[in-house]
Amino acid sequence: MNSADALLKTLIANGLEVVFANPGTSEMHLVAAIDHHPEIRPVLGLFEGVVTGAADGYARMTGKAAANLLHLGPGLGNGFANIHNARKAKTPMLNIVGDHATYHLKYDAPLTSDLDGLAKASSNWVGRSLSPDDLSSVGSQAWLEAHKFPGQIATMLVPADCAWGETDNLGPVVENSGPLKVEDKEIEDAYKALSSSENAMLYLGGNFLDEESVSLAGKIATTTGCRLATDTFVKRHRRGRGITKIEPIPYFAEMAEEHLKGVDTIVFIGTKPPVSFFAYPGKKSYLSPQEAQLIELSSPYQDGKYALRALNDLFKGSKIDSQYIPNEDINMPTSGLLGPENIGLLFAGLLPEETIVCDEAATSGFFVTPHAWNAKPLDWLALTGGSIGQGLPLATGAAIGAPDRPVVCLHGDGGAMYTLQALWTQARESLNITNIIFSNRSYAILKVELDRVGALETGDRAASMFSLDNPAINWPVLAQSLGVTGYNVTTVEEFTKALSDSLAAEGPSLIEVMI
């Protein structure tokens, strides 16, 4: 059989269901193999950053990898930013990158590059096929590596002749061993530390912000009186009415430092001690109080849920105090101009239960996020690696991974321009996504950072580097040109109608909100 077909059969046997692709000549036999297997859903992205970001969203919602089909070094390079975000989220991802035929590489053709170097820079594991006979076994190993708990980036490099050759070999079906064990002594130490502390914090992250985990944390906090916290940007966080509220620490270093001030004990589960996003003159990089006892009970690679259950058993926690549960009151306005003071209330009040929110709102998130705790139960997916342009692709993949749930993407206008091609894929796949673009016509976060790093006094030329208003981007027209219904709203009434109509529609919509 054709080796590309053998690879796809192997991956299907291991659980592959979706291929996100932006292929080229070197991948044509892999494209043909997709056509031979109708159980695979092929999804075309018009830019590789859409492909890799969508695979991240898909995996966050399903818990397993899609396959990304990418073209040579430049294709992998184009997808790098959202591979980086997925790597920081510890998302399972499988990249299949075509390369020149083995005998063609020596001629240094125009698209030849250091593909192995690029792959190693963006991946946790890299494998290269050397012949048609080993291609499927490399595929099995790549699938295994991608799914090592809690997930990682696996990239397999496929020379064209290794994909078009003939073989009788299929790769094995593999099984992952799951998370690493947490030692009972570590749990006992954490129990003693939380029991004896007067100002402790239980700090959750990674894969342990699902409803069971946050509920266990709420029971522990009720028993001990400890505070609860999580990372600023998280992989997937269960939130909403009736669910234990675990707030992210603030983005800005000095605010995070103040938030943690006075805490004498921090127990970490599924994450590590927080650091500031950047270095700033005269400000701390390591944010935990210097005098605090730090206990890393469970790393991201260990069984944090076991640790939470065992810890709660020791405390005999059975209920969650109301102080850890969000206030369900949302006083939604019914009329007036739309602005920072009311958009968060409207957003939280109008979201249906089980919405998936993909958040890259940047500075505009300050208007929305505080109110979203009071929304009906939902899942919140954030920009984990800080590389902007993730939100629209992330929402695209999340909608494919959870087709029965509405998806809402919150996005700043500057970041959305990085991967706006995702709108075309949303329309092509008829995905139920509402994209809310906060249009302040600037890279507002960079204006803030310019001041914070203590840059020298600046003028109009520096300011022009952050401005998006010359020419102004017409988001509704841009959306419509890509097959997505577009709205521009300025009042409460217009936003209410646009969001309600978008959530009820079968396909994607975009709402531009002027901030």
Image (cartoon, helix red, strand yellow):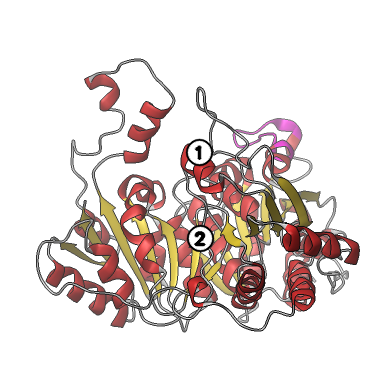
> Distance of mark 1 from mark 2, alpha carbons?
16 Å
Residue 147: x, y in percent? 75, 65
Tag 2 secondary structure: loop
Circle on res. 346: none
Q: Is residue 113 magenta?
A: yes
Mark 1 highlights which residue?
253
- What span is in magenta? 106-117
Question: What residue do we see at 38% from left, 49% from top?
Answer: 362
Q: Image quadrant of residue 298?
A: bottom right
**Left or right of residue 306, residue 367 in this image:** left
Crowding at mark 2 (Cα within 10 Å: few <14, some 14-19, many 20+): some
**Helix, strand or loop at mark 1:** helix
Left/right placement of residue 509 relative to residue 317 reads left
Q: Dot 2 corresponds to which residue?
A: 247
For marks 1 and 2 on the same chain, the one whose residue lies earlier in the sequence: 2
Instruction: Kindly indicate the quadrant of the structure image that contains residue 328.
Output: bottom left
Residue 197: x, y in percent? Answer: 70, 56
> Vertical placement of 340 versus 258: above or below?
below
Determine if the magenta segment contains residue 418.
Answer: no
Q: Amino acid at mark 1?
A: Ala
Tell me whether circle 1 and circle 2 mark residues in contact (CB < 8 Å).
no
Examine the rendering and report whether any part of residue 148 can be seen: no
Q: Position of residue 463 (x, y in %)?
A: 26, 26
Which of the image's four quarters has the N terminus?
A: bottom right
Residue at 69 percent across and 59 percent down: it is 94
Q: How many marks?
A: 2
Amino acid tagged 2: Glu
Can residue 106 be seen at all in this image of the molecule?
yes
Q: Position of residue 372 (x, y in %)?
A: 38, 68
Q: 409 or 116, which lies in front? A: 409
Residue closest to the eye, 485 or 138: 485
